[in-house]
Amino acid sequence: MKKVFLALAAAILAFASAQEINYITGNRGSDVDYATRKAQEYMADHPGVTINVIQGPESATDRAQQYLQFFEAQSGEVDLFEIDVIWPGDMAEHLVNLYDYAGYNEAAPDFFPAIVANNTVDGRLVGIPYFTDAGLLYYRQDLLDKYSLSVPTTWDELTAAAQTIQDGERAEGNPDFWGFVWQGNAYEGLTCDALEWVASNGGGEIVEVQEDGSKLITINNENAIAALEKAASWVGTISPNGVTGYQEEDAREVWQSGNAAFMRNWPYAYSLGNGEDSAVAGKFGVAALPMGSGEGARNAGTLGGWQLAVSKYSANPEVAADFALFLTNHENQLDNAITRSLLPTRTAVYEDQALLDSGSAFMAEFLPVFQGAVARPSTATAPNYLQASQYFFSAVHSVLTGEEDAETALALLELDLESLTGFPTAQ
């Protein structure tokens, strides 16, 4: 009997020691520190489980390439990945369906629907929302008060308010003041900005999944053309000519120095704008980005953020999936928000009194923005999203710089997307 017991104990010990996963997180020290702390908490409640935290590359592009190397080798070396919001479609074939694991069907409705939809490929949930981002409008409240203006709710209102404030500030001796700064360089950031302009004007979402699951190229339409013409009209008027080379930090530099009335940027700029070195600290607010004037106009901030995904080559997918669910539960999303200012993906966290009483209370202002966020067509165009995005931002950039008119640029873009994807067009 003793031998049988010892053999059973050895078998249990071998099984327990086999419950080991590797989790690759972000590059910042806070990413690793937080993940390590949470791994220790989880392991304390799950004897026999080992979680190893791995620091990922700094560049998101490098991270994507590293992940694809693991996947192409069908390697189980990493069990749990943090993936960008635009990667689920391209990586879906290598990821498990989280709906197959305990707790996910019950948890999914608690997250922002737009992110869950973005992470669902052919009915499979391949990533659980970890933390989020969406495009925001930053506005100078002090200048709105000075010129007796309200926060703009449409792009036409923003254009008029930006011009009024710009004219007034320049007349008072600040020739470097601009009405509106944003991201106009030819890169992924312009895809985000331009999708907001187009979607908010009722121009669709570039490539869309239909109710029957089919995919349709919708970008070449009158509302999209009008949205790009409006944006192009800002260059050299309420926005500097150099805005066509701006990325996020370029826009923030102008804004934070006090030389812009409005800015489009991500939530990260909020706390920086209220820093000790900021000329606009305590003088600004945030709101949903404006609506257009076309039929179907709405608020549309582009969705950003990161997800947790489990490799289908993992030897312990159940453990990896359970740890991912643990990391994204209400308590840990609240902890992540308060300690690291990372925006929750669960609606209820924004209403939690602990958050409202903390230094991260400003996050509650963002809730309407995330509820109306628009996803880039990464799932619809998978596995060709990166190329589709390049076609899109290149076409938009050509309109902003005057190389092409909007009608011609979108007609050519439609042909490029048709050739790339093989999808039909809405025309």
Image (spheres, rainbow, N blue to C red):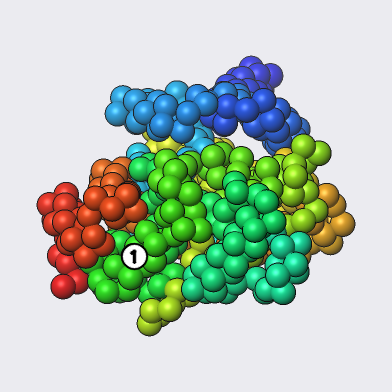
Q: Which image quarter is the N terminus in? A: top right
On the rendered image, what quadrant is the C terminus found in? bottom left
Taking 387 as reference, is 238 left or right?
Answer: right
Residue for point 27% across, 74% down? 222
Image location of residue 65, percent across then percent down: 37, 28
In the image, 247 versus 380, the foreground residue is 247
Question: Residue at coordinates 28% horizontally, 53% vertically from top-left?
Answer: 402
Q: How many marks?
A: 1
Locate residue 225, reporting x and y percent: 29, 67
Farthest residue in the bottom direction? Answer: 295
From the viewer's perspective, is 205 left or right of 411?
right
Q: Could one spot residue 99 in this view of the protein?
A: no
Above or below, comparing residue 378 to residue 212 in the picture: above
Residue topped by disc 1: 229
The structure residue drawn at horizontal position 69% and vertical position 30%, both measured from the top left corner, is 30
- Observer-nearest residue: 248 or 103? 248
Q: Hey, which residue is sitting farthest right in the picture?
A: 357
Identify the residue shown where x is 35% and y is 43%: 186
Q: With respect to residue 23, does 417 lie above or below? A: below
Specify whether residue 146 is in view: yes
341 and 280: which is toward the camera = 280
Relative to 238, is 33 on the left or the right?
Answer: right
Amino acid carrying label 1: it is Glu
Which quarter of the figure has residue 365? bottom right
Res 296 quadrant in image: bottom left
